[in-house]
Amino acid sequence: MMESELLAFLGVGFLAELIDGALGMAYGVTSTSYLLGLGLPPAAASVSVHFSEVFTTAASGAAHWRLGNVDVAMCRRLAATGMAGGAAGAYLLTALPGSIVRPCVAAYLLAMGLVILRNGLRPGDVFAKLTGPELSGLGAAGGFLDALGGGGWGPIVTSTLMARGGEPRRAIGTVNCAEFFVTVAAATTFFLTVDSFHWTAIGGLIGGGLLAAPVAARLTSRVPPRLLAVLVGLLIVGLSCANLAAALG
C-alpha cells in the first residue's frame, strides 16, 4: 500500500513540475488539487506541496538560471515581498478549522484553473510593464494566496507579468526562481506551526519534481504555451469541481 501511494505521489510530482516548468505555473495548484482529491486536509496538502517545492523550485530555478531565463532585479523584488506574503498565508492556514478551509481552498483552486484556462484562450494583448511598487505588491499577494490555497504563485504572478508585456521565457524563469524563496518562507512557517507531516506525499512529490525539472525548463521554449494552458486549465477546473462538490457534500 505504501509503495502504491509513493508511486502515485511520484507521478503527481512529475506531472506537476513538468507543467510548472514549461508553463511557469500550476505546480501547487495541480498537486494540491490531487492531494485534496485523495482525502488530505487542506493544511496537510499545502504543507506537503510547499515542502516538496523547496527542492523542485531550487532545481527549476537553477535550470532556468543556467539557460539565461532569469531577470535578477525582478526576481529579488518578487522574492522579498513574496516571502512575507507566504509566511503570513501559511500561518493563517494552520490557524483556521479544516471544515472552513477545505471548501474555500477548493473554490480558490477552481478560480485559479479558470485563470489558467483564460490565459490560454485570450488574445495576446500587451500592456504597460509593472513598476517596482507594483511588482512588490504582486509578490506579496502571490505569496500569501499561494501558501493559503496550496498553490497560485504561478497563475497569479506569471500570468500578470506575461499579460503586462513580459517576455514569456524571462517571465517564467524569473517567477520560478523567485518561487524558491517564497516556498522556503512558507515551508519554514509550516514547520514551526504544524505537528505532523505526510512524509510519503512529500517524498513522492520531491522525487517526481526533481526528475521533471530539467526537462521542463527546456520545454519552456518548445511547447506552445497557450495549448498547454488550455489543457492544464481544463484539468484543474475538473479536479477542483470534484473537490468542491465533495467538500460541500
Image (cartoon, rainbow, N blue to C red):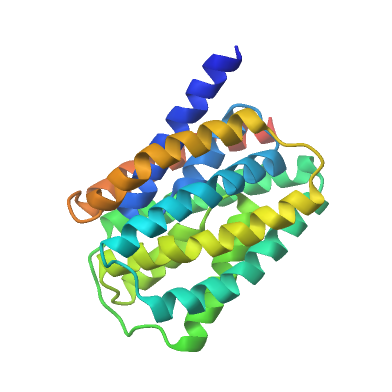
Q: Number of numbered discs present?
A: 0
Depicted 21 relative to depicted 36: above or below: below
| Residue for point 47% across, 53% down | 57
Q: In the image, 108: left or right of 56?
A: right
Report x, y in % for residue 240.
52, 39
Which residue is outermost to the top? 1
Residue 125 seen by the camera = yes
- The residue drawn where x is 23% and y is 47% is 227
Give the vertical position of 244 relative to 118 (above or below): above
- In the rendered image, residue 205, in percent from the top left (x then y), is placed at 51, 36
Q: Quadrant of the C terminus?
A: top right
**Where residue 17 sits: x, y (%)?**
40, 44
Of 158 and 236, nearer the camera is 158
Q: Is residue 203 left or right of residue 191?
A: left
Residue at the (70%, 36%) spot, across then down:
41
Query: Can residue 242 be seen here?
Result: no
Location of the N terminus by quadrant is: top right
Nearer to us in this view, 62 or 133:
62
The one nearer the camera, 91 or 248, is 91
Q: Where residue 131 sits: x, y (%)?
A: 43, 88
**Could you say which quadrant of the image residue 157 lies in?**
bottom left
Q: Is residue 106 placed above or below 73 in the rendered structure? A: above
Q: Residue at x 76, y 45 (%)?
A: 100
